Amino acid sequence: MDQYKEEFIGFMVDCQVLKFGEFILKSGRKSPFFMNAGAYVTGAQLLRLGEYYAKAIHAHYGDDFDVLFGPAYKGIPLSVSTTIAYSRLYGKEIRYCSNRKEVKDHGDTGILLGSKLKDGDKVVIIEDVTTSGKSMEETVPIIRAQADIEIKGLMVSLNRMERGKGEKSALEEIQELYGFDANAIVTMQDVVEFLYNTPYKGKVYIDGSMKSAIDQYYAQYGAK
């Protein structure tokens, strides 16, 4: 596993973004793990988060894109922090763009925040986590309605590796439905590999009992 991925897993644990226990998800599924990107709240955390996203985006998409699009609301700080990090790490100026939930009819009018989209732009979408792919149903039409653009792909922080609407994972369903790549900084398989029976800062987060709960969860909800 790449070093930045191992560091990112530890970072999620440190920030209490990734937790283990018993959680009821929006889908109604009872999950032994939970990720809440809203727990990144400090300047230092957002700076590091942007760097991890930038490294993963660069690894998957190189420099061949112009705009990072972060869907409202959680995608807004993600797109801002990652464009800053991308400039610092790779020396390329990437524009950030996000959408409003409601169209603004005065001042800076329209549905977009940040950069406008223009014909020929290559766009990478950035999100926290995708479980069902529902957010893409709203986001992709908004982006494609703005200009003649190319969506290079989607980057999320964690691939939960569970079924979306069908038998495949949400990221696989997005790839098939929209025709662009969908990737994650890390997968839950990476998380288990890194934390299982291995102390992180003196604590074992995934012991035998938790590993069994995760295995049972994937037996029921895991993507085929």
Image (cartoon, rainbow, N blue to C red):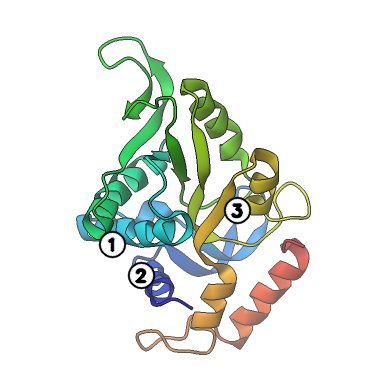
Q: Residues within 10 Å of mark 2 (few under 14, many from 20)?
A: some
**SS label for mark 3:** loop
- Going by the numbered disc 1, the residue's amino acid type is Arg
Q: Is residue 142 above or below residue 211?
A: above
Q: Residues within 10 Å of mark 1 (few under 14, many from 20)?
A: some
- Going by the numbered disc 2, the residue's amino acid type is Phe
Measured as percent of width and height from the top left, residue 69 is found at 41, 38
Q: What's the residue at 36%, 47% (across, down)?
A: 78
Q: Earlier in the sequence, mark 1 or mark 3?
A: 3
Regarding residue 71, the answer to whether it shows in the image is no
Which residue is more in the foreground, 190 or 146? 146
Residue 22 is tagged as none
Regarding residue 37, the answer to whether it shows in the image is yes
Q: Is residue 204 above or below residue 80?
A: below
Q: Are marks 2 and 3 in contact (CB under 8 Å)?
A: no
For disc 2, the marked residue is 11
Q: Nearer the viewer, mark 1 or mark 3?
A: 1
Q: Are marks 1 and 2 in contact (CB under 8 Å)?
A: yes
Residue 25 is tagged as 3
